[in-house]
Image (spheres, rainbow, N blue to C red):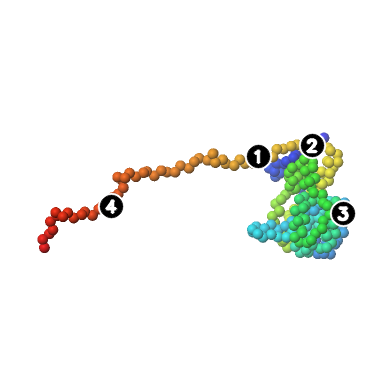
């Protein structure tokens, strides 16, 4: 039986889906020495999932640099705390390597943000949005794509948390690791479907945008008409009476 996918996934269905979470080991990297060990492990893998997190700004005109780089294998996810270690040169080796398959979603945006930290050279990545679009899928967010392929929900409750915090909560660590790991899951599932051709994509029409309120639908505002005054209604100022020449003057 072929796998059924939707060209567009209804966002309203996502809250009712079972949660998907990374079940492997999560390691925070806070020094160059730890970064070297992490990269040494990662370069020995066949496929890696990448993602980044940036502290959200709630003030107009204020922007923050990328605070976290997540790189995950199938079993271990490394959280590189760029706020504290910057961008070690060993990470450049990981980005320029051409042997390991590297997967991201909207990765060009992540690279653009990373280049605000460092003059970064980057070897080709597998872009999941392009990968899915070639199969006829139009919804490109990680959450919708994962729900479409696996029928599971990726939580986004930690997305706007402080990624520059000294210590992450367990919810932040799990959120960050899940996003990078999910890239591997999607890549391998979609690759298998493309290889076998054993899938069909049901075309779902785009939702109609809300119809703007027409000017013709609005009731015209009726202005209250002021009653016109007649000329006779105007109040006349009392005029001073002129003295008549025939009036007798009092005798002094």
The residue mark sitting in front, 4 or 2, is 4
The residue mark sitting in front, 1 or 2, is 1
How far apart in space, not on screen, are marks 4 and 3 (Cα)? 100 Å
1 or 3: tag closer to the N-terminus:
3
SS at mark 3 in the image: loop
Residue under pointer 3: 98
- Residue 200: which numbered mark, if any? 2
Front residue (pair 251, 154): 251
Residue under pointer 1: 208
Q: Residues within 10 Å of mark 1 (few under 14, many from 20)?
A: few
Front residue (pair 101, 242): 242
4 or 2: tag closer to the N-terminus:
2
Question: Please, is residue 153 above or below residue 242 in the view?
Answer: above
Residue under pointer 4: 237
4 or 3: tag closer to the N-terminus:
3
User: Image quarter for residue 137?
Assistant: top right
Q: Residues within 10 Å of mark 2 (few under 14, many from 20)?
A: some
How far apart in space, not on screen, are marks 1 and 3 (Cα)? 44 Å
Image coordinates of residue 27 in percent, x first then y, are: 80, 58
Front residue (pair 10, 102): 102
Image quarter hosting the N terminus: top right
Question: Please, is residue 201 above or below residue 103 in the view?
Answer: above
Given contact means CB atoms under 8 Å apart, are the residues at marks 1 and 4 in contact? no
Given contact means CB atoms under 8 Å apart, are the residues at marks 4 and 3 in contact? no
User: Image quarter for residue 121?
Assistant: bottom right
Image coordinates of residue 231 in percent, x first then y, are: 31, 45
Q: Residues within 10 Å of mark 3 (few under 14, many from 20)?
A: some
Most distant residue in the top direction = 1
SS at mark 2 in the image: strand
Q: Residue at left 28%, top 50%?
A: 236
How far apart in space, not on screen, are marks 4 and 2 (Cα)? 92 Å
């Amino acid at each position: 039986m072929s796998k059924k996918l939707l060209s567009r996934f209804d966002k309203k269905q996502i809250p009712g889906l079972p949660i998907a979470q990374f079940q492997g080991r999560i390691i925070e990297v806070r020094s160059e020495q730890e970064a070297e060990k992490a990269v040494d492990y990662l370069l020995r893998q066949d496929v890696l999932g990448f993602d980044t997190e940036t502290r959200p700004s709630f003030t107009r005109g204020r922007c923050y640099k990328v605070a976290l780089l997540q790189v995950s294998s199938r079993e271990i996810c490394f959280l590189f705390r760029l706020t504290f270690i910057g961008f070690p040169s060993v990470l450049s080796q990981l980005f320029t390597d051409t042997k390991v398959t590297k997967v991201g979603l909207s990765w060009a945006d992540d690279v653009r943000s990373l280049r605000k930290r460092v003059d970064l050279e980057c070897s080709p990545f597998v872009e999941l949005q392009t990968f899915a679009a070639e199969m006829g899928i139009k919804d490109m967010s990680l959450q919708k794509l994962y729900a479409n392929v696996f029928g599971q929900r990726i939580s986004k409750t930690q997305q706007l948390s402080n990624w520059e915090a000294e210590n992450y909560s367990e919810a932040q660590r799990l959120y960050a690791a899940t996003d990078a790991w999910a890239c591997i899951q999607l890549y391998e599932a979609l690759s298998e479907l493309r290889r076998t051709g054993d899938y069909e994509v049901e075309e779902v029409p785009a939702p109609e945008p809300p119809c703007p309120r027409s000017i013709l639908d609005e009731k015209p505002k009726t202005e209250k008409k002021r009653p016109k005054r007649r000329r006779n209604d105007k109040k006349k100022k009392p005029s001073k009476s002129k003295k008549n020449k025939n009036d007798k003057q009092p005798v002094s």
